Image: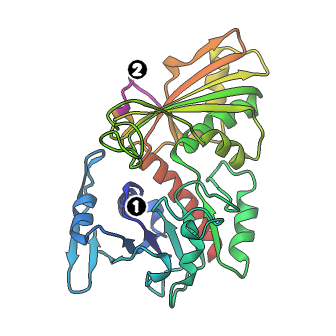
Amino acid sequence: MKVGINGTGLITRALVKLVALNEEFKNIEIAQINGRTMTINRLKDLLLYSSSQGHSNLDVSINYDTNELLVNGNKIKYTANSKPEDIQWLPEIELLIEATGTFRDDTKNSKDPNRHFKSLNNNLKGIVITAPGKGSIVDYMWIASPDLEQEITTVTSAKKPFVIGAASCTTTAAIPIVDTLDEVFGIESCYLTTVHAVTRSQDILDGSKGWCAMDTQLHSTGATKATNKVLKKSIPMSGIAFRTSDKAGSFIQIDAVLNKEIIKENLLDAFKNSKYKSSFAYSTVSNPPSSYVRGNKAMVVLIPDEFVIIDKKRVIIKGLYDNEEGYTNHLLQLINFVISKMK
């Protein structure tokens, strides 16, 4: 299916790279990207090389006559409009990936993704937001959402355009740990801590957005609420995010009080037999740095050497996640599923 992407940030570039280089995403054809102020030349350069991920191994060139990027021989139309209703989407595009981080709240007109459906001559049937949705927008995650097939089938078969959210990178890392622990042992309560790579919301110097991005900062995190929202559970959870100056690669720690007494072997068996087992990876080095996880497509890379059990019921699980390509890989699994239900 031909899809369009609104936005030119890190997730968009990861989407282009992973779709181009992975056969499992062959049903997804990126036909158009809409940006704002970024030139097509700059986007080409950023698709070729990333400061956080390195060389992409893509073959990227530009057809200036048609204003198209050629990515591994595939044509991608490039447009630049800041208002959703002004974007001229190609008529063959049925699914839009909203990746600006701005249009994800249907209670505020300035941030409402439904504005895309007002553009002239569009044939859009649905929108997937690469972030948690707000207002009435429901978040889904591949594997995790308990009623995924039923609800996506209902959404895509309705006679009106749909908008769904795709949670966040931290939620993607937290859910397989939390859900596995809760399903196997039961969770009485838990606390999430993430040490997160720098984001575009941080200023290089102290400014209107907050303290300097080179400092480590304390932030609230919406991942705890999003975890329960996606899983349709009510696990008592709280959490905190430390924003660092690292380019990519984030740590996660889940400190959980369980309903059962356990030993470490119980934990390892639980993850090994979890429904998320194909989405876990395991560190092969001791005390891995954040750079260790860059380019890893797992939802979370567990660090078993750092698992801690306190008083038999309290466990501390540590892991790493690539907040760019790891999240995007899981996002594409969801998009693949949505497309299968749109046919």
At x 35% / y 70%, what residue is drawn?
A: 36
* Residue 286 is inside the magenta segment: yes
Q: Magenta residues, as a range?
A: 281-290
181 horizontally vs 23: left or right: right
68 horizontally vs 274: left or right: left
Residue 273 makes an appearance in the image: no
Element on which disc 2 rests: loop
60 horizontally vs 165: left or right: left
Task: Return the residue at label 2.
Answer: 287
Crowd class of label 1 (few under 14; some 14 to 19; many from 20; radius 10 Å)? many
- Indicate the amino acid at tag 2: Asn
At x 74% / y 22%, what residue is drawn?
A: 258
Residue 113 image point, x, y percent: 57, 70
Q: Seen from this angle, which residue lies furthest bottom?
A: 121
- Identify whether 80 is placed above or below 317: below
> In this rendering, which labeled residue sits more in front, label 1 or label 2?
1
At x 73% / y 26%, what residue is drawn?
A: 189
At x 60% / y 20%, what residue is drawn?
A: 316
- Identify whether 106 is placed above or below 251: below
Element on which disc 1 rests: helix
Q: Give the mark, 1 or 2, whose residue is nearer the N terminus.
A: 1
Counting every numbered tag in the picture gives 2
Task: Return the residue at label 1.
Answer: 12
**Foreground residue, 120 or 289?**
120
Which quadrant of the view contains residue 178? top right
Residue 164 image point, x, y percent: 63, 64
Which quadrant of the view contains residue 14? bottom left
Residue 128 makes an appearance in the image: yes
Residue 108 image point, x, y percent: 61, 66
Residue 217 image point, x, y percent: 43, 31
User: Quick one: quadrant of the C terminus?
Assistant: bottom right
